Image (cartoon, rainbow, N blue to C red):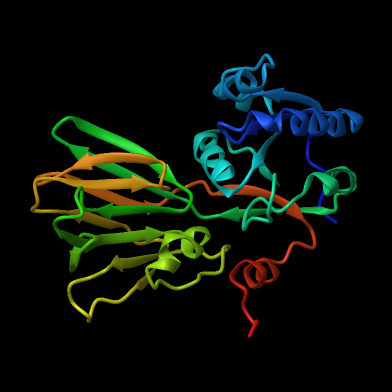
Amino acid sequence: MTPPFKLEKAGIVLRPSTPELKEVFYEVRRVFEAHGIEVLIDNISGGMIGVLGQQFDIMCAESDLLVTIGGDGTLISAVRRSHDYGIPVLGVHAGKLGFLADISLDELDAFLTQVHAGEYRIDERAMLEASIKTAHGEKRVVAFNDIVITRPSISKMIHVETFVDAKAFNTYFGDGVIVSTPTGSTAYNLSAGGPVLFPLTQVYALTPICPHSLTQRPVVLPGHFDVEFRTPDQSALAVVDGQDMYEFGAGDTIRISLAQHPARLLHRKAFNYFDVLKEKLNWGEG
């Protein structure tokens, strides 16, 4: 049995642009308060449904648990934004089962009873940390799924010079390259022909996107390696979790490694990644 963790306050984040989640929020708040847990909501989510909220960073600093209501995209954004606070994140899906948001509203009450009894698990999942150095300065970003180095226009391909632990490794020529965490391996990485990685491993994958050479193949690297990207092209993009975009070009560098602190996801003790994988990818069906 896992020792119960302190759970006195929970911060709520709703899927953006979905005001119809108002009644779902009220029900989630009712369930948490029935278990003696105070509920907070961030000001953007609160403003969307007409409820007074708090600034996201303040809410994270005061909360013992972050709860997202929506889908995997909502959870991914919340994990990235709350990374420096190290609090567990629970995904409540508002619709179909997700890879990450795996608790339904109907299951929430029973799940919180299990949490109080120590019947839960917190999975630690690797995240990426990137340092983007340009003539304008240095920017640090974190990613939960992936960082994609890609072209700024569909009319041209991009050269991506790649170094692993400061040693020349490869030059990708095509639409770009995906740096994927194990969690993100079932996202864009999978669509580009990359490998499915078990989510609790400390590795990451480099997967070329539509490479010009048929000899380019995905590569899985140990987590203690770091990878650096440069391009001789004047313009390129680094897309973080499909949500944030950064420009770079000739003379700039992007250095990526596994983040020192992982993401922490709260799950049922019986949560089985392979069951979710089978359901979401329809494996085993004729």
Return the residue found at the far bottom. 286
The answer to whether residue 40 is left or right of residue 147 is right
Q: Is residue 246 above or below residue 59?
A: below
Q: Position of residue 165 (x, y in %)?
A: 26, 61
Q: Position of residue 282 (x, y in %)?
A: 62, 74
Q: Residue at x 19, y 65 (%)?
A: 174
Quarter of the figure with the C terminus = bottom right
Q: Residue at x 21, y 59 (%)?
A: 166
Q: Is residue 281 above or below residue 50?
A: below
Q: Is residue 40 above or below residue 7?
A: above
Q: Is residue 56 above or below residue 256?
A: above
The answer to whether residue 70 is left or right of residue 170 is right
Write down the quadrant of residue 35 in the picture.
Answer: top right
Residue 208 seen in this snapshot: yes
| Residue in the foreground of this view, choosing between 184 and 65 | 184
Write down the quadrant of residue 175 in the picture.
Answer: bottom left
Q: Residue at x 22, y 70 (%)?
A: 211
Q: Residue at x 32, y 57 (%)?
A: 226
How many numbered markers are drawn?
Answer: 0
The answer to whether residue 14 is left or right of residue 186 is right
Q: Position of residue 270 (x, y in %)?
A: 79, 63
The answer to whether residue 78 is left or right of residue 180 is right
Q: Position of residue 88 (x, y in %)?
A: 66, 42
Residue 168 seen in this snapshot: no
